[in-house]
Image (spheres, rainbow, N blue to C red):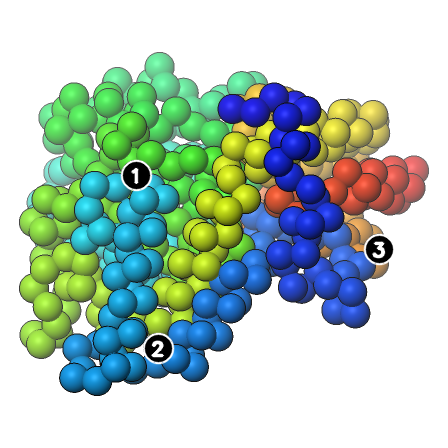
Amino acid sequence: MLGAEEWKLVINIGDLRKSFPSLAEGRPGANTVFFDGAAGTQICARSLDRMNKAMLDENANFGGMFETSARAGELVAKTRAAIADFFHARDAREIVFGQNMTTLTLALARTFGRRLSAGDEIILTRMDHDANVAPWLSLAEDRGLTVKWLDFSTETFDYELGELDELLTPRTKLVAVNYASNVIGTINDVRTITARAKAVGALVFVDAVQYAPHGVIDVQNIGCDFLVCSAYKFYGPHYGILWGKLDVLEALEPYKVRTAPLHAPDKFETGTKSREGIAGVLGAVEHLQAVGMAPIVAYEEELTRQLIAGLHAIKAVTIHGKGNEGRVPTLALTVQGKSPADVAKAMGRQRINVWHGHNYGWEPVKRLGLLETGGVVRVSLAQYNTREEVDYFLGKLDEFVS
Ligand SMILES: Cc1ncc(COP(=O)(O)O)c(C=O)c1O
């Protein structure tokens, strides 16, 4: 990992911003502060170019006896290989594309439920985005499963891992956890959780939507069975990706049309695939690999330190989450005497994009006791943000609060 200063040798933030066309002079984004990365990032040029090319030169259905079809097939194969590399997966057949993380998870839950019976148990958490909660709750209702909850501490903002062993039993079939929280920003020890779940034979489903833009993913190291993410959170288009262990994917029987292939990954990809989406994913991964994850992480850590220090200096602000360590650059705030919606509106008037409310983190915001009071203000940084933007935001927030 690079030190606090070393990233500067690798990243020139002015140059990096040039790889995001929406930030270019003359566009509305040029004078907008995008502190809404956790809800969706700006697209990078490589992704946009790849999508454009896909619609112009690779636009055909697969398996045809002509060149455009062959090119479309090559695009998909190349993207699967690139994503497999990005996740440290063993086999490109382990990569499943879909409309978004929520749709992929809803479909997988339904498929997974085919092998469960009443009384089987699943473990969900109080920290997760609803897309990694509601699909499993619906499944539990349909199949008569017992749902157990892994809590998190409102002091350390980590999962209560001490409680996990009590929740796990030989009937636990699945543990669904997030890699990084979309509300409080905690990076979770998914490797330890997986090891404990495996000890009772449970499968582990990891939601890496918020981790993917901010860290290196290694599914071999985690040891989980499934991992999902969404390309629009890491500078690509609105498209979802599911990784699953090949033997686990092969053993599942997804709902599909009879004429669709029998094997992974195609059997999970119902209907016509979005080749523009797939091309955009490839461009986004190429972008991340070109910039390099280590300098990105170091740069974002520095911005986060600056942001947290500045927020601490504003008395009316409470940060609901960890300090500088063990987090992604996503912060949940409340401001004394102001509703989250009012703060977001005031920031919006200054062309600073921040989110407010539960941010689909219904469980964590409820756990923080903030559901009835309008949730939180969510400030989330991305690789194209700058020190000047952080200072501008802190100044405007301070002005609004006082
Ligand atoms: C942690 C997390 N999981 C899942 C999702 C849902 O992703 P998608 O919009 O691709 O369905 C989000 C979206 O914000 C998220 O932040």
Q: Which of the marked residues, 2 or 1, is nearer the chain's N terminus?
A: 2
Instruction: Give the residue pinned by disc 1.
Output: 88
Instruction: Give the residue pinned by disc 2.
Output: 58
User: Taking the image as drawn, is residue 169 in sight?
Assistant: no
| Residue type, mark 2 in image | Glu
- Of 39 and 370, the residue lying toward us: 39
Residue 199 pos. (x, y %): 16, 21
| Residue type, mark 1 in image | His
Element under label 3?
loop
Mark 2 to mark 3 CA distance (whole Å): 42 Å
Q: Residue 336 carries which label?
A: none
- Of 50 and 29, the residue lying toward us: 50
Q: Which residue is drawn at 37% across and 65% down?
A: 278
Are dots 1 and 3 in contact, CB under 8 Å?
Answer: no
Q: Residue 264 is drawn in which quadrant?
A: bottom left
For ligand 1, tell me if the residue under mark 3 lies within 8 Å: no
Residue 385 pos. (x, y %): 70, 45
**Outermost residue toward the top?**
162
Residue 244 pos. (x, y %): 22, 46
Q: Residue 10 is drawn in which quadrant?
A: top right
Q: In the image, is 328 to the left or to the right of 274?
A: right
Q: Which of the marked residues, 2 or 3, is nearer the chain's N terminus?
A: 2
User: Taking the image as drawn, is residue 71 in sight?
Assistant: yes
Instruction: Give the residue pinned by disc 3.
Output: 350
Answer few, some or many: residues within 10 Å of disc 1's Cα (few below 14, many 20 plus, some between 14 and 19). Answer: some
Q: In the image, is 147 to the left or to the right of 264?
A: right
